[in-house]
Amino acid sequence: MVSIIIPVHNQIEYTKMCIDSIRKNTQRNDYEIIIIDNASDDGTFEFFKNQNIKYIYNNENKGVAKAWNQGIEKAKGEYICIINNDIIVCKNWLTGFLMVYESIKNAGILSPGTKEGKLNYDFESYSENFTKRMKNIKEKGFTGWCMFIKKARFEETGFFSEEFNIGIGEDTDFYFRLKEKGYESYITGAVFVHHFGSKTLNDIKAKTGDKFEKSNIEKLKKKWNIKENYLKRKTENLKRFLKNFLIKLFFGYKLIEK
């Protein structure tokens, strides 16, 4: 079984689209959906409370890390898929995740190929062509908006660190802890999602400011002794650009598109 964990704070229309796409495009019935509602006040609770979904409601916004951990504690699946509510998924997405994950001996996080921004294209035909051509392409890394993880990994590394307030940093911190244990994380072209673009986080920042984001970034840097290295960053960006250019040239797509 796969437990799909979706944290929400308002944005009900995106949540509906996300759930609809999961139900439409998940071939196997061996999955469960767990929504963790961080004090939504837009009708999210009223809409989902009578559906066949595990639902956890928090009276205040406890942040992303806490919500993810609440979902993991309730999860029955062997695998966990943490997904933003502003995402729609492609056909047979969980099957693709499972096939790739089980083929990697030391898999940590597995994330999908993604197109970000407005949904102004034919998602079904685009995702079908994308996964057909990119199914054997993967590169090291992950994306925080969709993370497929074997539940046993949390037994080794612990859950997400709740020191990171609201959101930002908790996923990267977990990624580093996985690396310490010898696990590598990958983005795979065998799965494709559309990401509308951090709708909840952007809304929170618009209302309350980005002080929490800056604070979390500083916590992450201090915790992992991350130093700014201009030359190294420029070199890595150039390497990434060239790699993406070649992948686009030969396969017609990039793993992350905007």
Image (tube, rainbow, N blue to C red):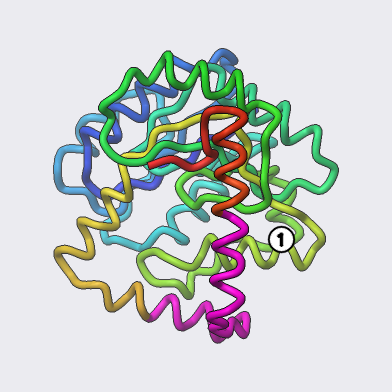
Residue 45 found in image quarter: top left
225 drawn magenta = yes
Q: Which residue is mark 1?
A: 178
Q: Which residues are magenta?
A: 215-240
109 drawn magenta = no
- Residue visible at 39% across and 47% down? 7
Q: Position of residue 223 (x, y in %)?
A: 59, 82
Image quadrant where one finds the N terminus? top right
- Residue visible at 33% across and 23% down? 51
Q: Position of residue 119 (x, y in %)?
A: 28, 29
Relative horizontal placement of residue 21, taking residue 11 as reference (left or right): right
Q: Amino acid at mark 1?
A: Leu
Residue in front for this viewpoint, 192 or 12: 192
Residue 237 found in image quarter: bottom right
Residue in front for this viewpoint, 156 or 169: 169
- Residue visible at 63% across and 61% down? 175
Secondary-structure class at tag 1: helix
Q: Residues within 10 Å of mark 1 (few under 14, many from 20)?
A: many
